[in-house]
Image: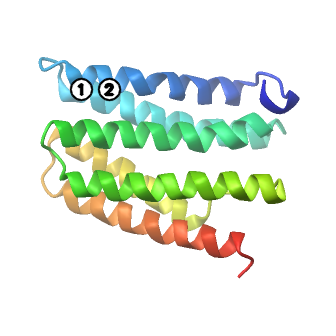
Amino acid sequence: MLGGGRLTIANMLTLLRLAAVPLIVYLFSIEEVDPRWIALVFVLTGITDVLDGRLARSRNEVTRFGTLVDPLADKLMVLATVFSLVARGSLPRWVAFLLAAKELALIVGAGFFLVSRSKVTPASNAGKLATVLLYVGITGTIIGVSGMLYVVILGVGVSILAGLGYLLQALGK
């Protein structure tokens, strides 16, 4: 395990979420699949995201691996799902590209911050709110609930604000 850690239950959940990324892309590629199945997989990954963090903290098993890979798994799941929704015509391209640009900037910035300071910044309340908005909006979009595009857009906006907050924190301001 990265950083000399052990394979904890929380880390297994993170790995499961990472493994679900190609599964969700595959499910989107099947025209006959009921969207509720896709939504179920997506929601379950969100639940594992909440569970793995709580388990790691409550069991005092926070590992460097989990700290680094957990947010990456979340970003990959959201981006894979958003781009799959774009491919289906359910979301506009600009939403996916804006979110992808923000996530790429955050990943590059986090990598630079880790190399220069060896510190991982915990998720902010704005980042957590953005995740909830994105999961609600994306799930609603998958199953065809009207108006969910606005929730996704709000989630992207809050995500960008959270990213700016991380940048300011990294710069020490």
Residue position marked by numbered label 1 in the rendering? 28
Q: Is residue 8 left or right of residue 15?
A: right
Q: Is residue 64 visible?
A: yes
Residue appearing at x 78%, y 29% in the figure: 2
- The residue singled out by tag 2 in the image is 25
Q: Residue 36, position in %: x, y?
A: 23, 29
Residue in the image at 82% along x and 35% along y: 61
For label 2, the crowd category at 10 Å Cα-Cα, with few meaning under 14, some 14 to 19 and many 20 or more, is: some
Colour option used: rainbow
Query: CA gap, disc 1 to disc 2?
Result: 5 Å
Residue 120 visible to the viewer: no
Residue at left offset 76%, top offset 25%: 8
Does 99 sit left or right of 53 as displayed?
left
Task: Name above or below for residue 67 compared with residue 35.
Answer: below
**Residue lying furthest bottom in this view?**
173
Residue positioned most to the right: 4
Q: Are discs 1 and 2 less than 8 Å apart at CB?
A: yes
User: Up-down: is 172 above or below 91?
Assistant: below
Vertical placement of residue 59 versus 158, above or below: above
Q: Residues within 10 Å of mark 1 (few under 14, many from 20)?
A: many
Residue appearing at x 38%, y 20% in the figure: 23
